[in-house]
Image (cartoon, rainbow, N blue to C red):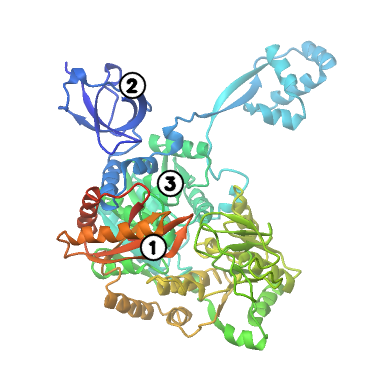
Amino acid sequence: MPATIVRVLPISGFEKLLDYRVPATIDGTLKLGCLVRVPIRNRQELGVVMEFSSAAQFPPGKLKQITQQIMEYPVLTLDSAELMYWMHDYYGAGFEALLETFIPAAVRKGMGQKLEKQVMLAGKFSKDDFETLNKRARKQALTYQFLRDQVKPLKKSLVEKRLKISSSVLNGLIEKGLVKEVSEVVERLAYDDDFSEVEEIDDQSFQLTKEQERCVQSVRKSLGTNRFHVHLLHGVTGSGKTEVYLQAIESVIRDGKDVIFLVPEVALTPQTVGRLRARFNRFDFKTVVWHSHLSSGERLDAWTSLASGEARVVVGARSALFAPLDNVGLIIVDEEHEPAYKQEETPRYHARDVAVFRAKLCNAVCVLGSATPSLESLYNVSTKKYLSDRLFKRVDNRMMPTVHVVDMRQEFISQKGAVTLSRILVNHLRDRLKRREQSILFINRRGYSRSMICPECGWVAMCRHCSIPMTFHRKFNKLVCHLCGHEHEAYNRCPECRSAKVKWKGTGTQKVEDVVKQALPQATVVRIDADTMQKKNLFRKILGDFRMGKIDILVGTQMIAKGLDFPNVTLVGLIDADLSMHVPDFRAHERTFQLLVQVAGRAGRGDLSGEVIVQSFTPHVGPIQYARREDFHGFLEDELQTRKEHEYPPYRNLIHHLFRGMNPQKVEFFAEQWVKHLEKSDLNWLEIRGPVPAPIEKIKDYYRYQIWYFTKNVSKTVPVLLQLREDFPMPEDVIDVFDVNPVNLV
């Protein structure tokens, strides 16, 4: 019988399939998507079985043989393999980067299961023997007595800690044959710990509103067809979108299918997992967590649960999209408008768009939810690509919060200088404190102050590796570059003119925290941002304390601006509403509007009414006024008209082409030569703009030039650009990267 031949895609170093013979020992068990070890030249490499083949480039007798099958079940499902090929073609991503994205490092490196030493009684003891032991080794007798009263084996280290004994006590009992030590596999289940009780919100089903019922029936109708559909669930903040998700999930689970639930921020994961586990704990399956803050062991065990079918729901950030589920029936993308769904490193992809395509491959339903949908999704509704479900009212007829816009120009005049908090905001914070209600203050950057400047000569503390100002962090008395991480001790004097009048210009989360503590010394104020979140589970502790009322005022960055639900929060303050508008990005107005609406949505979600204070130096601009009036339709018409005039997305797609290197003249030269190379080809369907210096011209000592491509067909454009790129002689010290539909234009 001829040997079976398979085509394997190596994980590192190759962008093509290689042929191998399957050894007889695994010929009957090897499946598509299995992880194998194969010989390549003189070394052993990991690869994934992508095809079974009847013919090969070489005679079967000369083909090398697979060395080892690493796991019994596939690491890539059939739809995941198709999805990977699509991402390779659509985004121009390399197979090595894609395989590393789809298959966690813990799986590739073969991390083992966690074993825990447990102890239990091995046999009975006569009364006389026990008395003898009690006289000779009292601690052993007490330990034996303790274990006799237990109903199940206990962790060995826990027994030692609880009884305050050394390991020699238990080891003595083991040597006597009175106690048995066993090693048990322990699952590292994320968010199954001391914080979980706070996070598991009481989530008994309640009576749906008429709007919710209509949306649930709409999604269930699509689920019943077993065909691909996309629903845009557009509901105001507090309208009960999560309940619609939960009802849809229950329908899918009862139908025997699997669910992927994406959230944009790690901070939203505990709350979401808590809701799901509280609702579905009666079902015989697990809900697992997946994001970058998990340990390698937690990732491995979560992945194994999903691949084996033990877990049927995964909740997490972007990477949860690639979970090894082979029967996906529903994909939910909560807060679908969030820029966090765009991966900025290789492979560069947008999780929302990839979620839609995976749902298409699985004949599944994809639900995109948001109070402020992206213009791209709204455009797809208008062109009938997506179905639309609307929630216009908050649950229980709760009122939307009242929005006050404070003109900070007037505050500057009346308070004779720049201030962090307006008088009205301080008064409202004080009022909430008296009423024992909670407040959230939002600022769109971390650190103490934005930059360090000299008012005498105009010097600004710039990163020597990047062309941006450094941020002052008072806690460490350091200047930090938030692009490359370079640090420098804070200056007491200007290094240029030696003036001692060096100042910190701008406002950061640390500074807001300090100002609030000075104004309201009796308040419990806590800051939550990327810097304070370095310690594992710290953000969960802070959010748990806030939910339990231990914190009066929460100061934070973007991670608290979305999705979180705290019923006792009745005041939200937005410190710097202008910041997101003053960037060179055609989406600046859209993001400002979304930010204002989302931040405002954190207030008044319980039985108490809410208020929002928006501080702005340009209170008259469109995004702020539309958000204040809750006029989504007006903003949409205005913004789409502007986009149409310039043919910006959603009317055309953007592809960003970045060139970088340490020699600025060389980078500019080859970017210009590339454009000349393109002009020789017939690309009349493609608009090319550039090359021009990037808005941030230097990062980590690399100078940057950029080119923009405007196209109505990405699938046609990317392969052409990649083919032309293969024929272009780019030097090794000039690096270029394509990014399809980027969200960060800086």
- Residue at 77% of width from left, 30% of height from top? 164
Vertical relation: 248 (above or below) 637? above
Q: CA distance from mark 2 to mark 1?
A: 43 Å
Task: Check the picture and name the quadrant holding the C terminus.
Answer: bottom left
The amino acid beneath tag 1 is: Val
Q: CA distance from mark 3 to mark 1?
A: 26 Å
Task: Check the picture and name the quadrant holding the N terminus.
Answer: top left
The amino acid beneath tag 3 is: Val
Residue 154 placement, left or right of 330: right
Whole-percent x, y for residue 502 in the image: 67, 71
Please tell me the numbered disc located at residue 314: 3
Q: CA distance from mark 3 to mark 2?
A: 33 Å
Whole-percent x, y for residue 139 in the image: 80, 22
Residue 524 placement, left or right of 38: right
Vertical relation: 690 (above or below) 280? below
State the residue position of label 2.
67
Q: Quadrant of residue 457?
A: bottom right
Asked whether residue 362 appears in the rendered view, the answer is no
First-in-chain label (3 vs 2)? 2
